[in-house]
């Protein structure tokens, strides 16, 4: 394909991203929540585009839009491309939608050359990856992977509408959502193009990155209990100041995360009674600890909790830690990753392998198929934000890399 044809292809994908950005539940912002009218509009648009370019397409029982471009043999297994079509509130135009329009571009290129690969190409737009509306994210891909989160239909949004009611309004039957399962007919591979959501590629001056896996995350709630007292009368050496102890704990989190090459964040802190003239009696803070290596994450957590104990003893406070969730990492398929490295190289992109610190639909799809991801550089690493930004040249490179990956993988995953 010539450079100008590639540019035209990227412009068409860009235009589709603009059209999808206009589908919103909140005028003036980009907000497409699970099972909402805006998501329905986006699904219908994608469904139309899929049919236009020669795919058999439908909305599955979980509200995911799925299209299939047949392979050389009618019953050939499929390589699945895609991402999610929902967004956070006041989100950007690329997080999610990028992977769907890139999938369409790949099929369009094959169809316009009347090319049938040994495998079919499926494109999916997942519903509810972000979990913004009902909490508990990635319902669309969970359903496809045959994983049923208990009690999902009873979860309510901020207006009191349950996920079950919203699913009905969306045209689905909540009792049959998990008929979207592809456990018995899994794709032979799943490849997702997604914005990086971090600043690394931009910092290195590289358009695309090969994702090694999706990091596991441990979340904990840490409570530091000391003794409240008068800010003017209790001498410095007679205090059990929970806020100072918590500060020391937070510094320990940073130090230990670096030492174990993990990523850790304390993003939330509550102090009681939170008054200018009172020594803090108790403090609660969050801990979010991530790593692509589960062993590293566990070892870092253990070290952090040990450090909290030492700090508690030296400051005369009590530190209690409650782990609220702990998920393992999901590695991308090494064989697929190898193909992507080659595809990036042939696309003229230096090969950088990097973990994804954020969760993605691939976490679920990995239960039924080997997965891989390609990241696209985004300005200042911004995501979940209206200023989310990529360039059309990077989009063109991303599409090219996915086309090459599919072509190379077709022979191995048929
Ligand atoms: Zn996303």
Image (cartoon, rainbow, N blue to C red):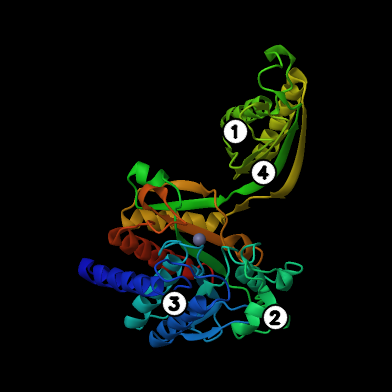
Between disc 1 and disc 3, the foreground one is: 1
For marks 1 and 3, the one nearer the N-term is 3
Mark 2 secondary-structure assignment: helix
Disc 2: which residue? 174
Between disc 4 and disc 2, the foreground one is: 2
Between disc 1 and disc 2, the foreground one is: 2
Residue 211, position in %: x, y? 49, 52
Whether residues under marks 3 and 4 lie with C-beta atoms below 8 angstroms apart, the answer is no
Mark 4 secondary-structure assignment: helix
Mark 1 secondary-structure assignment: helix
Q: How many marks?
A: 4
Disc 1: which residue? 257
For marks 1 and 2, the one nearer the N-term is 2
Mark 3 secondary-structure assignment: loop
Residue 31, position in %: x, y? 48, 67
Q: Is residue 56 above or below residue 225?
A: below
Disc 3: which residue? 117
Q: CA distance from mark 4 to mark 2?
A: 35 Å
Whether residues under marks 1 and 3 lie with C-beta atoms below 8 angstroms apart, the answer is no
Tell me, yes or no, if residue 179 can be seen here: no
Lateral position of residue 99 relative to residue 390, left or right: right
What residue lies at 72% left-to-right and 38% top-to-bottom? 222
Tell me, yes or no, if residue 68 can be seen here: yes
| Among the 4 quarters of the image, the one containing residue 187 | bottom right
**Front in this rendered view, residue 108 or 248:** 248
Q: CA distance from mark 3 to mark 2?
A: 36 Å
Local crowd at mark 3 within 10 Å, few (<14), some, or many (≥20)?
A: many
Q: CA distance from mark 1 to mark 4?
A: 13 Å
**Front in this rendered view, residue 138 or 374:** 138
What residue lies at 61% left-to-right and 42% top-to-bottom? 268
Lateral position of residue 156 relative to residue 376, left or right: right
């Amino acid at each position: 394909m010539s450079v100008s044809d590639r540019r035209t292809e990227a412009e068409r994908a860009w235009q589709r991203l603009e059209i999808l950005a206009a589908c919103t539940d909140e005028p003036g912002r980009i907000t497409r929540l699970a099972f909402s009218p805006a998501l329905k509009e986006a699904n219908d648009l994608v469904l139309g585009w899929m049919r236009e370019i020669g795919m058999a397409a439908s909305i599955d029982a979980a509200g995911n839009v799925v299209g299939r471009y047949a392979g050389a043999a009618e019953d050939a297994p499929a390589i699945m491309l895609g991402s999610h079509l929902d967004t956070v509130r006041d989100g950007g135009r690329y997080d999610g939608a990028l992977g769907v329009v890139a999938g369409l571009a790949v099929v369009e290129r094959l169809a316009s050359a009347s090319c049938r690969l040994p495998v079919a190409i499926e494109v999916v737009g997942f519903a509810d990856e972000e979990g913004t509306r009902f909490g508990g994210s990635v319902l669309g891909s969970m359903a496809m992977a045959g994983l049923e989160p208990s009690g999902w239909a009873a979860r309510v949004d901020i207006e009191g509408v349950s996920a079950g009611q919203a699913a009905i309004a969306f045209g689905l039957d909540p009792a049959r959502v998990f008929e979207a399962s592809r456990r018995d007919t899994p794709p032979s591979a799943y490849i997702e193009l997604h914005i990086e959501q971090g600043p690394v590629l931009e910092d290195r001056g590289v358009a695309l990155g090969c994702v090694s896996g999706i990091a596991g995350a441990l979340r904990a709630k840490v409570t530091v209990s000391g003794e409240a007292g008068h800010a003017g009368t209790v001498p410095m050496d007679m205090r059990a100041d929970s806020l100072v102890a918590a500060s020391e704990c937070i510094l320990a989190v940073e130090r230990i995360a670096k030492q174990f090459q993990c990523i850790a964040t304390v993003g939330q802190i509550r102090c009681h009674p939170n008054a200018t003239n009172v020594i803090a009696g108790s403090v609660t803070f969050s801990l979010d600890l991530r790593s692509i290596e589960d062993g590293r994450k566990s070892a870092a957590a253990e070290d952090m909790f040990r450090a909290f104990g030492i700090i508690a003893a030296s400051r005369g406070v009590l530190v209690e830690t409650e782990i609220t969730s702990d998920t393992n990492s999901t590695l991308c398929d090494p064989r697929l990753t190898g193909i992507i490295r080659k595809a990036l190289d042939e696309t003229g992109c230096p090969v950088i392998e990097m973990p994804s610190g954020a969760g993605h639909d691939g976490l679920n799809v990995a239960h039924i198929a080997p997965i891989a991801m390609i990241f696209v550089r985004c300005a200042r690493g911004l995501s979940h934000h209206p200023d989310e930004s990529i360039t059309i040249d990077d989009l063109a490179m991303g599409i090219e890399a996915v086309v090459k990956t599919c072509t190379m993988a077709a022979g191995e995953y048929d």
